[in-house]
Structures are given as structure tokens and as C-alpha cells.
Amino acid sequence: MSDRIVILGGGLAGIAAAISLVDAGCPVTLIETRKRLGGRATSFVDPRTGAVLDNCQHVVLGCCTNLLDLYQRLEVLDQIQWHRTLYWTDGKQEADANGTDRFEANWLPAPLHLGKSLRQMKIFNRVEKRQIRRGMLRMLRLGIRRRAAWEGKTFRQFLDEAGQSPEVIDRFWNPIVVSACNLEVDAVGAPHALQVFQEGFLGNRFSYAMGLSCVPLVELYGTVEQHLQQGGGEIQLGVSAKSINFDGHRVTGVVTTEGLIEAKAVISTLPFDRLDKIISEPLRRADARLHHLDQFDVSPILGVHLVFDQEVMSLPHLVFAGGDVHWIFNKGMDGTGQQHIHAVISGADQWMGLDEASIVKRVLAAISSALPAVKSAQLLVHRSVKEKRATFAATPEINAYRPGPGPSALGGAPNLYLAGDWSASGWPATMEGATRSGYAAARLAGGTIEEVPDISISWPARLLGLR
């Protein structure tokens, strides 16, 4: 076992690190406290109904090259269904395939590909559309390299400077940002939000396309154990790390609830607060990356599963421009005609103190104008899932504390590697950020793993400054 690399945490970062290492010929042991893989992007069996439900609806975008690479390695890429049309509603009138605003690319290259859709959106007037175009042009001209100049400032400050009205901020910019970064525009760091638009909407005509899993999220990880075993790796589920052994210079292994595992290296993909509990004071003092774990905060997400006795929604999904609910996803109908829909509220601090009855009542009120059939349909099943610690809070000051995968110039344990969406992945708190961090840690630990390239930026976008 001393030749093995021990990976702590079986979320996307841990899976990405483990898969890439065994593919490179490095034996690994992956430890996960729970009895299932996926971390916060997984599923559970609802004890009330026996149904397998996702913790929350997770999506992959076309620009998420590392996550798509991982799905390809796991041979589940065919389980992702792509949506190139995003349906928007202001929640005031009935949403259907004919009257609902459609956000979709035309034949033009980025960043011109979404221009026609924006011009045709009915929920914004002509003045508001000009504001949105002006904001997008400002982001293009800022470029990727210069967005670092907005470190320490909120995205709201950028939007104010770009001449965006409060109405446009509330109904266009905020629904996108809060869904992607899990914080409102007033709280999220400007560079995090700018990245969402620059790389998700403006750089490549496929970047904005939304991929949804056709199966419960936990099934996407069904091939992980076999993949690791074939490469000389193993998984220990239901096993928790209690401490990381440190000899004053290097880490030597991990003490778990099942005993000691010796290791030539350790990759921690644990959340910052969990990692903080298992490191010793000598290790903390020796490694500058571990000095500021108490600086991180969290932001919650609320998912609400609703099952009706009849069809209440014909569209595959809806983006709500303003209002209490941010997204609704159509999870399909069963053989008896019952329909399952899933409402998602990001940055859901104000919802965490509500009981389930109050949550369901508030959600139904928020969606009833757009989906009037819910008023007459019978609600058969409801299940709210509170992810109180869903993501780290991507605030303006947090980038200064996000640690890199390997030891810094200030020193640190040379064979301890850090990953997780909260680490310095270069991305906000997303599945892509988690996957990138796992790959980055694995490259340092294994040394022979190629970096996954970013999606290409079109020549018109580069010409306008996005480089």
C-alpha cells in the first residue's frame, strides 16, 4: 500500500483524480464516507416513496471540457441529453412552446450566435435589450486576462458601471449568475460572474448548450469501481478519514475508521471544513495552503421535487426571469400519466428556515402563472431537499484564500495535494471546477497526465477582445 496514492472524498474531484491516475498507471485507494459516490452531485432513495431522486438538478455546459472528458472516460457521455434552446419566462403568463422566449444559437459564430434570440425576447423591451448588448460588449472588450482587475469587487459593481438598470440586473443578469455561481449579483465576486458570460456565452457557439443527465446522477458513477479495479485501484465506501499522518516533512498515510493506510501521496478533495477537522496543528503550521480554511463560507441550494397526477408542463425546462424560483426542470411522465417536475432555488439562504409545507406553498405560488395547470392538478408527492452547504461562497475576497493543488513557494507537505470546487480551480463552485481541480492534483501526483484543453474561442470573439 505504500506505493499507493490515497484520495479522500468520492465527489467529482475525487473521482476525476482517481480515474486519471489509474489511467496513467498509478494505483489508488479512494475513500468516501458515504455509501455512494458523487458527493453533492448525486442521488438518494426517498424514504417516503422509494424513488431515486437527485439531491439537486445539476447541469453541464458545452464549455465544461474537463467534466465532459470525465464522462467520456466513464463511458456515460451518451447519458447526457443536450438542450440548445433555453426557455425563458417572466412568470406572468402561461409558458408554452409558442409563446415562451427562446434563447438559442443561430448559424453565426460566437459572439453573434445569440443576437437574434435576444432581439426576439418579449420579456425585455428595446431599451433593456440595448443595455444587455452593451454589457456583453463590455465583457468582450475586457477580455479574459483583464477580468482579474475586478478582484475584490462584486458583479453588481461591474453591472452598475456598465450602465445596467436594476430591472435588467434582476431579470436577466441575476438569474444566470445565481444559477451558475450560487450567489446573487450583489454578493458574488465579479471575476466569477464575468467568467460565466465570457466563457459560457460569448466565446464559442456551443458553450452555452445545456446537458442534462437522462438517468439519476448516481448512475453516472456506476462504472467508477470497475474502472479503478481494472487499473489496480480500489474504493472504500462508508469509510471516513480521521487524520492525515505527517512526519514533519511529508504525509505518510491516512488514519481511517478502518485503520491506517500508508501512502506515498495523499490527495484531499474534502470540503474545506471537513479538511480543517482532520489536519494536525504541525501540518497546518507547515503548509501555508491550510492557514486560511476558516475564511470560507457556504451558500445553500434548495431543490423541490413535485409529482402531479397529470401533465402540468410541456417544455423541457424554464428559466424564470426574476421571482422566487430560478429554474424548473421537466423530469418526465410515468406510465400512469403522473408528471415529475423539479424546481431549483440557488443562493437559497432565505428558504433554509422554512418547513416543507411552506416551501411547497411558496414554490407553487411562484410557478402557477407560468404553469396554470398546477392549480387544477393534484399534487401527489412533494419533497424538498435542502443543501445547506451546497457550494463555497464565491465572494469578492475569497480567491486570495483558495489553495492551489500543490505546495506553494512558502512551503508545505510536498506530497499532499488539494482539490475540490473550493480550491483554486480557476472556476466558480461548479462540477467543472471540481473536476478540473481533481485532474490538476492528479497531474502533480502522477506526473504524466495531459491537461484537457479549454473549448476554443471563435475568431470574431478574439477580434473583439476575448483573449
Image (cartoon, rainbow, N blue to C red):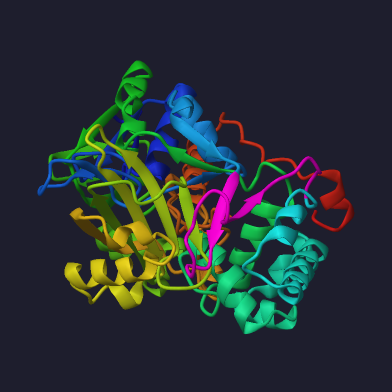
Against 152, is 375 above or below? above
Q: Which quarter of the picture shows residue 263?
A: top left
Task: Identify the residue at the far left of this view.
Answer: 48
Percent position of residue 17, x then y: 44, 37
Task: Identify the residue at the far front of this view.
Answer: 376
Q: Which quarter of the picture shows residue 256?
A: top left
Against 132, is 157 above or below? below
Horizontal arrangement in the rendering, residue 353 relative to residue 65 (left or right): left
Q: Which residues are magenta?
A: 85-110
Most frequent secondary structure within the magenta stretch? loop
- Using the rendered image of the protein, determine whether residue 226 is visible from the camera's viewpoint: yes
Percent position of residue 407, x then y: 51, 53
Percent position of residue 198, x then y: 70, 57
257 or 345, which lies in front? 345
- Using the rendered image of the protein, determine whether residue 443 is visible from the camera's viewpoint: no
Q: Which quarter of the picture shows residue 49?
A: top left
Against 432, is 228 above or below? above
Q: Is residue 103 magenta?
A: yes
Q: Is residue 400 magenta?
A: no
Percent position of residue 8, x then y: 31, 44
Horizontal arrangement in the rendering, residue 163 relative to residue 20 (left or right): right
Tag count: 0
Q: Residue at x 53, y 35 (%)?
A: 68
220 or 57, which lies in front? 57
Task: Identify the residue at the far right of this view.
Answer: 463
Q: Residue at x 22, y 75 (%)?
A: 354
Against 153, is 327 above or below? above
Is the N terminus in the top left, top right, bottom left or bottom right quadrant? top left
